[in-house]
Amino acid sequence: MKADKKTDATKINKLYKNAKLCEKRANEAVTELGPDAQEEDKEHKSKEIKFKIACETIQAIKDKILDIGKFRVPPKREPQLLLQLLFQCIGLSKDLYETSSTHKVDWEKMRLLMNDELVASMIATDPTAIDKSVFLSLEEQKPELEESLKEEGTYDYYGEIYAMICEWIVCLMDLRTSCDEKREREEAAKKAAEEEEDAE
């Protein structure tokens, strides 16, 4: 049994390191855009690739994410808050994981949401489809999320799994911001072209 646990821990650690070393694949994708690509387009492509890798990682650790729901004892405060943010990202209603009377997290309800559908929803998430109010709320907590990824022991129980979920949320938010900026640039360029055409 100990050997199995050791092998399992090694596998998780390897996945975590691979997820953190996604910069290489992102840089390769940016290079493929060619030397004439705009910096904004390079940055957007990089964020697309990083989110894609984050989704691949989530798929790879699917069984471990499902295992979280098997624990009857609630995790500590930080992991619970992280899961709340995750549920917001995929559009789950708060009444699915909070008590109706106190509006506090109900772990029994929360852990039932750690299922196949949750993982499928994460992988299929469209960053641009996140409700604006939800995104603004996430933005306020992003610095804290990013800081938690730097501090060992923040998610001390099932640490790497929670950290990879956190990484997915951060990559999702980065891509959403990039998509919004890309849309604004395109709209501005279109408007400028129309004004130039009218002036002629």
Image: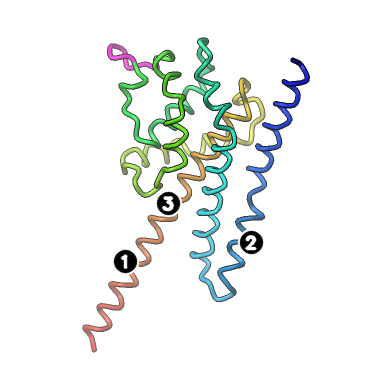
Asked if residue 134 is positioned above or below residue 43 in the image, the reply reads above
Q: Quadrant of the C terminus?
A: bottom left
Question: Which residue has dot 1 on it?
Answer: 187
Q: Amino acid at mark 2?
A: Glu
Which class describes the residues within 10 Å of circle 1: few (<14), some (14-19), or many (20+)? few
- Which element type, helix, strand or loop, lies under badge 2? helix
Q: Position of residue 72 (x, y in %)?
A: 50, 10
Question: Which residue has dot 2 on it?
Answer: 28
Which class describes the residues within 10 Å of circle 2: few (<14), some (14-19), or many (20+)? few
- Which element type, helix, strand or loop, lies under badge 1? helix
Which class describes the residues within 10 Å of circle 3: few (<14), some (14-19), or many (20+)? some
Q: Is residue 102 magenta?
A: yes
- The residue positioned farthest toward the right in the image shown: 3
Q: Which residues are magenta?
A: 99-105
Query: Marks 3 and 1, how far apart in space?
Result: 15 Å
Query: Marks 2 and 1, how far apart in space?
Result: 28 Å
Q: Position of residue 193 (x, y in %)?
A: 30, 78
- Which element type, helix, strand or loop, lies under badge 3? helix
Question: Which residue has dot 3 on it?
Answer: 177
Is 171 displayed left or right of 1 in the figure?
A: left
Asked if residue 176 is positioned above or below residue 60 in the image, the reply reads below
Please give the name of the residue rendered at 76% of the width and 16% of the height, measured from the top-left corner: 2
Q: Amino acid at mark 3?
A: Thr
Please give the name of the residue rendered at 55% of the width and 76% of the height, measured from the top-left corner: 36
Asked if residue 185 is positioned above or below residue 89 in the image, the reply reads below
Q: Is residue 140 magenta?
A: no
